Image (tube, helix red, strand yellow):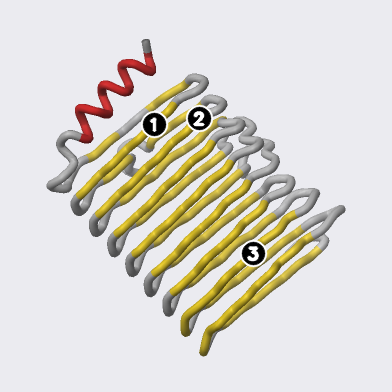
Amino acid sequence: MRKILLSSFLLLLTTFTYAGNNDIYITQTGTGLTLTIDQIGATNKVGTAANARVTLSGTTMTMDIDQIGDSNSFLGSFLQGNNTSWTFKNTGDSSAGLFNVGASGDVAGTDFDYTTVGDSTTFTFTQGASAAATSGNQDFVISGTSNTYTGICEVVGCINNWDIDGNSNQITTQQTGSANHAITVDLNGASNTVTVHQTDTSSTNVLNLIATTSSGTIDVDQCASGC
């Protein structure tokens, strides 16, 4: 019954998301959720820090979010979600996204795909900050100028793949845990800043960076502890 009501509720909300200034707040607990959100227009919000975020908990969830327009935002907290797939696409300038994954439970075997096309966007992704997590796989495609990405991955076997095109972007990531971290970066543009910290107490850190850039700054620290 919960899933049926939620689907009806979302359908009603997305009917009116074309002019902008629309807010969506969701709290969902359960297994096997399929959630689709489409927002078209400017200044739309899915969750807000001042009011309430999207809060989801359950295994084998599939979520697809598409925001088109300027100054849109998404703030979500995913408490627990083993074997879950998230897709988030943002098209527009000055938009913001925040994913807090694994706030109070395991999020093993997750897959996250993020795409942004626009300028001056910000995105923060944290996985496993408060609970155990394994086998996280994140793919990021960032296209535009003056975009900011911050990622923290405190999981065993965290894998990141980045495709970054544009100028003056700032990319910062930190990966910690006890086994097998990997980052692959394809970077094109000018005046980009990339900072990578990978700490691994017992196994392997891998960074594969291919950069075609001018006036870029790249800082890589790979440590047994304390990067």
Q: Residues within 10 Å of mark 3 (few under 14, many from 20)?
A: some
* Element class at badge 2: loop
- Residue drawn at (31%, 33%), measured in percent from left and top? 25
The picture quadrant where one finds residue 151 is bottom right
Question: Which residue is disc 2 drawn over?
Answer: 61
- Taking 41 as reference, is 198 left or right? right
- Left/right of residue 34 with respect to residue 19 in the rendered view: right
Q: Amino acid at mark 2?
A: Met
Going from N to C along the chain, the mark reached first, 3 or 1, is: 1
Neighbour tally class for label 2: few under 14, some 14-19, many 20 plus, Cα within 10 Å: many
Find the distance from the CA under tag 3 to the CA under tag 1. 29 Å
Residue 14 figure quarter: top left
Q: Which residue is mark 1?
A: 35
Q: Residue furthest bottom?
A: 215
Q: Tell me if 110 is positioned left or right of 180 in this view.
A: left
Q: Is residue 149 left or right of residue 11?
A: right
Check if mark 3's residue and mark 2's residue have beta carbons within 8 Å.
no
Asked if marks 1 and 2 touch (Cβ < 8 Å), the reply is: yes
Amino acid bearing label 3:
Thr
Which labelled disc corresponds to residue 184? 3
Q: CA distance from mark 3 to mark 2?
A: 26 Å
Instruction: Point out the residue furthest to the right here.
Output: 202
Q: Earlier in the sequence, mark 1 or mark 2?
A: 1
> For the C terminus, which image quadrant?
bottom right
Residue 89, x across and y down, in percent: 38, 51
- Given residues 51 and 176, the one toward you in this image is 176
Mark 1 crowd level (few <14, some 14–19, many ≥20, 10 Å Cα): some
